[in-house]
Image (tube, rainbow, N blue to C red):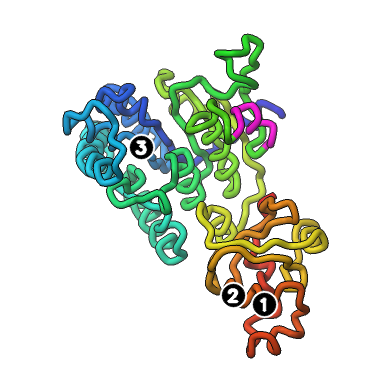
Amino acid sequence: MNPRNGSAALKEARRIVVKVGSSLVTNEGRGLDERAIGEWSRQLAALAAEGREVIMVSSGAIAEGMKRLGWTTRPRELNELQAAAAVGQMGLAQMYETKLREHGMASAQVLLTHADLADRERYLNARSTLLTLLGLRVLPVINENDTVVNDEIKFGDNDTLGALVANLVEADLLVILTDQKGLYSADPRKDPSARFIQEAAAGDAALEAMAGGAGSSIGRGGMITKVLAAKRAAGSGASTVIAWGREPDCLLRLARGEIIGTLLLAPTQKNQARKRWMADHLQLRGAVTVDEGAVAKLRDDGKSLLPIGMTAVEGDFHRGEVIAVRDPRGQEIARGLANYAAAEARLLCRKPSSEIEKLLGYVAEPEMIHRTNLVVTR
């Protein structure tokens, strides 16, 4: 890939989401790093002064709350983690407000859960709020709402949250600041021949193997989440940079076109906004399994999913909810809005559309998922 393409993508980025990890924000858990937050704030304010729109996704609330509460060991109980987050959010928001104001930048705290983005109306409300703040030249500081979140609705990591925010506001660039230089072809701690990846295509399957794979000790909460976040952000056309957060003037140099860390370029084609929303669901209510003929029609021909192609139904979903479509091997190939609830879908498996009324007593649509409400994911 031509390096100049990457440099141009950085220079031309007008809307930028910056995600910074907890280890950087809290100086490895020792408390909020005032100097580091001040440096990022200075650079963010400078980018805003250039006419760019910037959003910060910041971890660190639980670690800061633990410090304020005098806890030396991370609690296991959910209510204690939520309490620590509530205490820590006060300090986190105050620190960003203070440092950004020193550089003439107003800020706003925005707390999100997956439920906010899974519900279409709340998704649009969140988007409207963020775009309004940007229009007012206010810098949103976003974090997961750890004070109310539980395992069923949490993002899992702020790399994922950063990608979802990039898609939500249709950002041009996602910058993930971490405690590592970027992505290597293998773990450099174990393989001295590991090659540094300066530039690649977001979504390239080989990158996931390089990052250690979803089930490896390297990948669990590490580089794999960043690679997958880049893949997700690419759905809205946002390229991703993974870089060391303490690199001097990192954000400003990236905006000038300097490739720092690993740049994962997004394709120029963007998914439609509604399809991005469907693709960004982290938890799904259910799934339908389809035969190979249906797989070909969905993936290769861009057709709707008809009941006759379905072989099995999982879960308990309602009409209008987002469900997965799986091939005979159980791999997700698409997802979309169900025209029928799970109980009805089970009755429709392997049946032609002409029999829907006889089976259900009514016809909502001849398709289980219409092609306009379906996005291919694999």
Q: Give the range drawn in magenta.
A: 204-213
Dot 2 or dot 3, earlier in sequence: 3
Residue 347: mark in rendering: 1
Task: Name the spot of residue 161 as percent of width and height, x first.
Answer: 44, 44
Task: Please tell me whether residue 233 belongs to the stretch shown in magenta.
Answer: no
Verify CB contact (< 8 Å) between mark 1 and mark 3.
Answer: no
Please name the amino acid that badge 2 sits on.
Answer: Ala
Q: Is mark 1 on a helix, strand or loop?
A: helix
Q: Which residue shows up at 59% across the image and 71% down it?
A: 342
Q: Which residue shows up at 41% across the image and 18% down it?
A: 248
Q: What element carries label 2?
A: helix
Camera-nearest residue between 209 and 103: 209
Q: Distance between the residues labelled 1 and 3?
A: 47 Å
Task: Please tell me whether residue 212 belongs to the stretch shown in magenta.
Answer: yes
Please name the amino acid that badge 3 sits on.
Answer: Ser
Residue 58: mark in rendering: 3
Verify CB contact (< 8 Å) between mark 2 and mark 1.
Answer: yes
Q: Distance between the residues labelled 2 and 3?
A: 42 Å
